[in-house]
Image (cartoon, grey):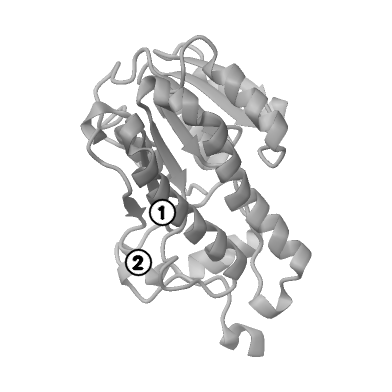
Amino acid sequence: MSAGHVELMGQGALRPGLLAGRRCLVTGAGSGIGRAIALRLTALGGEVVGLGRRQDALEETGARALDMNGSFRALTCDVRDASALTEAVDAAASGHGIDFLVNNAGGQFYAPATAISRRGWDAVIDLNLSAVFSLLSAARPHLAQRRGGVASISLTGIDRGIMGAAHSVAARAGVLGLTRTLALEWAQEGIRLNCVGPGIVFTENLDPAARARAEADMSAVPLNRATDVTEIAELMAFLASDAARMMTGQFLQIDGGAHIGRGIHAWSPEQAAS
């Protein structure tokens, strides 16, 4: 979701070549936050493998990555297909291992809990939580080979609840719990796992109704603006760097202070009554 990119000290706050020689795997790299992350890691010299369902979208990311310091390679895969996902992760790691994994692929719809069917619930949990477990399981030996790191996208405010997103909050809170559990279990292999919780973010694929709702709710953000995709990408690049080598099990909320404000909600009883 991007209402005009924020300038981050020219080309960014991090030094050129920071990620040279590092293999990075980014899911959902064909658009939005995932594309911004993939491009920033490539610009900093990373060998980036972008995973996504749409080859044409990944090719567009690749076209934007041309002439950057690193390299970008596309792999088409549906992260909900555990078998295909394992094959894709093995292909991404081939001959090197994985230095940094970004679990970004996901999605949801907004509705009060009473309007969410079991089928809708299962679909959101499968994409936003179960697929993350499958990906982490497949990537673990490759991450251990490089003593690598993981950053998974969650949501701001999962500890306080988000009306209209019960299924997504349950899934993303599960990702945080999984992250912290594996940060303990895999520490002996040198694998670091952290979560990033964006707040309001405007991407090109955002539903117009959801965009209007988010814009109306901007007062819930103390800094009074949306988080730009480039800001999330810069944070991810930091987590991929040696500067974050002692960070694990963390939940970093990049949301303009929304998690300490009155809360961001996708639905309200007042809205239903109107």
Label 1 neighbour load within 10 Å: few <14, some 14-19, many 20+: many
Q: Residues within 10 Å of mark 2 (few under 14, many from 20)?
A: many
Name the mark on residue 197. Answer: 1
Q: Is residue 103 visible?
A: yes
In the depicted view, which residue is nearer to us: 117 or 256?
A: 117
On the picture, is 198 further left or further right than 169? left
Q: What residue is rendered at 36% in x and 65% in y? A: 258
Query: In x, y percent, where is residue 167?
Result: 61, 65
Q: Position of residue 9 (x, y in %)?
A: 25, 33
* Residue kind at label 1, given as amino acid type: Gly
Residue 51 is left or right of residue 252, and the answer is: right
Classify residue 148 as left or right of residue 82: left
In this rendering, the answer to whether 172 lies above or below 46 is below
Query: Looking at this view, is 61 or 101 the one in front?
Result: 101
Q: Dividing the picture into quarters, in which one does residue 261 lie?
A: bottom left
Of the numbered discs 2 and 1, the one sitting upstream in the chain is 1
- Circle on res. 259: 2
Q: The C terminus is located in which quarter?
A: bottom right
Question: What residue is shown at x 24% (from left), y 23% (from top)?
Answer: 15
Q: Amino acid at mark 2?
A: His
Looking at the image, residue 57 lies above or below residue 255: above
For residue 59, say whether it is visible. no
Give the x, y percent position of residue 156: 42, 60
Identify which residue is drawn at 64% across, 29% down: 86
Query: Which percent across, then down, holds residue 54?
Result: 71, 31
Dot 1: element: strand
Q: Residue 131 is drawn in which quadrant?
A: top right
Looking at the image, residue 73 lies above or below residue 8: above
Tally of marks: 2
Q: Secondary structure at mark 2?
A: helix
The residue depicted at 58 percent of the width and 70 percent of the height is 166
Q: Is the C-beta separation of discs 2 and 1 under 8 Å?
A: yes
